[in-house]
Image (cartoon, rainbow, N blue to C red):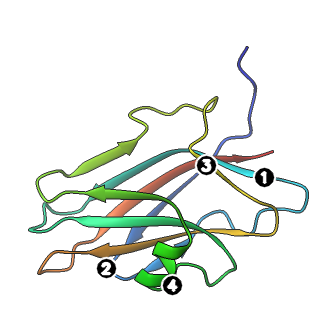
């Protein structure tokens, strides 16, 4: 039987080497469950992009090295693809990963293109 979750969403525009916070700190006694991630490159790039979703302190994922070390999920969008969704459709009953209370969920983008490429990041999650 499906549960009634308080679904939250965030939509952010990320530039190359930029880090954004998603949803603030996870409240005490709660766990954040990420259920859907979608990346839309603003242009078809020549090299593609990778967005690291990572968990930890407020400053987690502020560089490629830190983001890679703390990653929960990496969404790689190849140059010939403009949109990527994980999973293909939202699924609140089967979360992709969780983030513990007191931690932050950050997203960090890196581009392998010769020209920096922006991307829109849409994340669906709930706290329980």
**Residue 30 percent coordinates (x, y):** 84, 53
**Residue on which disc 1 sits:** 31
Which quadrant is the C terminus positioned in? top right
Q: Which SS class for mark 4?
A: loop
Q: How far is disc 3 from disc 4 in space, using C-alphas?
A: 20 Å
Circle 1 packing at 10 Å, graded few (<14), some (14-19), many (20+), is: some
Q: Are marks 2 and 1 in contact (CB under 8 Å)?
A: no
Asked if 98 appears above or below 44 in the picture, the reply is above
Nearer the observer: mark 2 or 4; the answer is 4
**Residue 49 percent coordinates (x, y):** 26, 66
**Residue on which disc 4 sits:** 62
Circle 2 packing at 10 Å, graded few (<14), some (14-19), many (20+), is: some
Q: How far is disc 1 from disc 4 in space, using C-alphas?
A: 22 Å
Circle 3 packing at 10 Å, graded few (<14), some (14-19), many (20+), is: some
**Residue on which disc 2 sits:** 16
Q: How far is disc 3 from disc 2 in space, using C-alphas?
A: 24 Å
Please identify the quarter of the rendering in which residue 64 is found. bottom left
Circle 4 packing at 10 Å, graded few (<14), some (14-19), many (20+), is: some
Q: Residue furthest front?
A: 69
**Residue 83 percent coordinates (x, y):** 26, 48
Q: Of callouts 2 and 4, which one flags the residue occurring earlier in the amino acid sequence?
A: 2
Nearer the observer: mark 2 or 1; the answer is 1
**Residue 78 percent coordinates (x, y):** 19, 57
**Residue on which disc 3 sits:** 97
Q: Of callouts 3 and 1, which one flags the residue occurring earlier in the amino acid sequence?
A: 1
């Amino acid at each position: 039987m499906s549960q009634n979750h308080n679904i939250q969403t965030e939509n952010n525009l990320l530039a190359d080497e930029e880090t954004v916070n998603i949803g603030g700190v996870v409240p005490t006694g709660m766990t954040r469950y990420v259920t859907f991630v979608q990346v839309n490159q603003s242009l078809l790039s020549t090299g593609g992009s990778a967005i690291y979703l990572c968990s930890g302190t407020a400053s987690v994922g502020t560089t490629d090295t830190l983001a890679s070390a703390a990653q929960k999920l990496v969404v790689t969008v190849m140059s010939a693809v403009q949109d990527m969704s994980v999973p293909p459709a939202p699924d609140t009953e089967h979360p992709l990963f969780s983030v513990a209370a007191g931690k932050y969920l950050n997203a960090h983008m890196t581009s392998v293109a010769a020209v920096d490429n922006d991307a829109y990041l849409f994340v669906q999650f709930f706290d329980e």
